[in-house]
Amino acid sequence: MSTQQSFVPSFKLRVALVWGTLLAGFLLFVSSFQLQFSFVWDKLPSLLGFELAPDGFVQGVPLTLLLCLASMVISLILGLLSALGRMSSSACAFGIATFYTSFFRGTPLLLQVLLIYLGLPQLGPVPAAIPSGITALSLCYGAYLSEIFRSAILSVDRGQWEAAMALGLSRRHIFSKIIMPQAMKVAIPPVGAMFISMLKDSSLVSVMGLWEIMFLAQSYGRSSYRYMEMLITAAVIYWILSIVLEVFQARLEARYHKSAR
């Protein structure tokens, strides 16, 4: 039996074979469109951000990453504050947190982008496109992260609060040193999924004329009637960026589980 098992490929190898087969099928499907790869190579430097936009600012992948990274930081803060507000005994904090999460989870992200970018000028302020995109992404995903953080915090056994308070520890110390490290183990997988979703939803800010990946792909495809080349290229770029986030998420999960052991 042991001799036979030695010839059985490992699980990772079998997974790699499955991925290779599916990838080959995907490439075969793409090749059926008779794409002009010379056109893709000509526009790829702009999509990857190796060339600056006409106004001298970054475009393509760097601009998409700028929007996402800034929105990730702000949405994490908003999500944690909102989660604490929803668990607060203060009627004011609870009311603000629940109203915020209800509105931004109950309306489409594209509508929120347009309300901020096109609606606010009717009230006086005229926000720029990049701050508008970051604001919309942060507010929307902060509302979703609120529920993730709330459920992760509640998953920590209440007895740990009581034991720590019996030792005379302050509530802030208990929360930062005991509760949050355990809650993070629960929160990391769904938070990572939210950030991958945010990366893809950042394409919606293309309606504001930002020269990010989707805007460039649509513009180049429209000007040359080569939509499939540009859209497939944009899809592959988003896919690669998502894989990078998945790898980072897996390493972060492994680190927290290792520290727990």
Image (cartoon, rainbow, N blue to C red):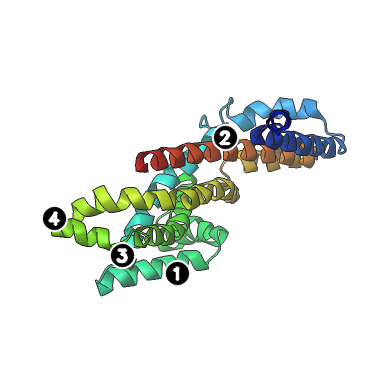
Quick check: can you spot residue 233? Answer: no
Q: Earlier in the sequence, mark 4 or mark 1?
A: 1
Quick check: can you spot residue 160? Answer: yes
Q: Residue at x 84, y 36 (%)?
A: 28
Q: Residue furthest left?
A: 168
Question: Which element type, helix, strand or loop, lies under badge 4?
Answer: loop
Viewer-side residue, 221 vs 182: 182
x and y percentages locating residue 69 in the rendered image? 45, 41
Residues under labels 4 and 3: Cα distance?
Answer: 26 Å
Q: Disc 1 designates what residue?
A: 102
Q: Earlier in the sequence, mark 4 or mark 3?
A: 3
Q: Disc 3 designates what residue?
A: 85
x and y percentages locating residue 63 in the rendered image? 52, 37
Label 2: few (<14), some (14–19) or many (≥20) C-alpha neighbours in 10 Å: many
The quarter holding residue 42 reads: top right
Viewer-side residue, 11 vs 87: 11
Q: Disc 4 designates what residue?
A: 167
Quadrant into which the N terminus falls: top right
> Which residue type does callout 1 highlight?
Ser
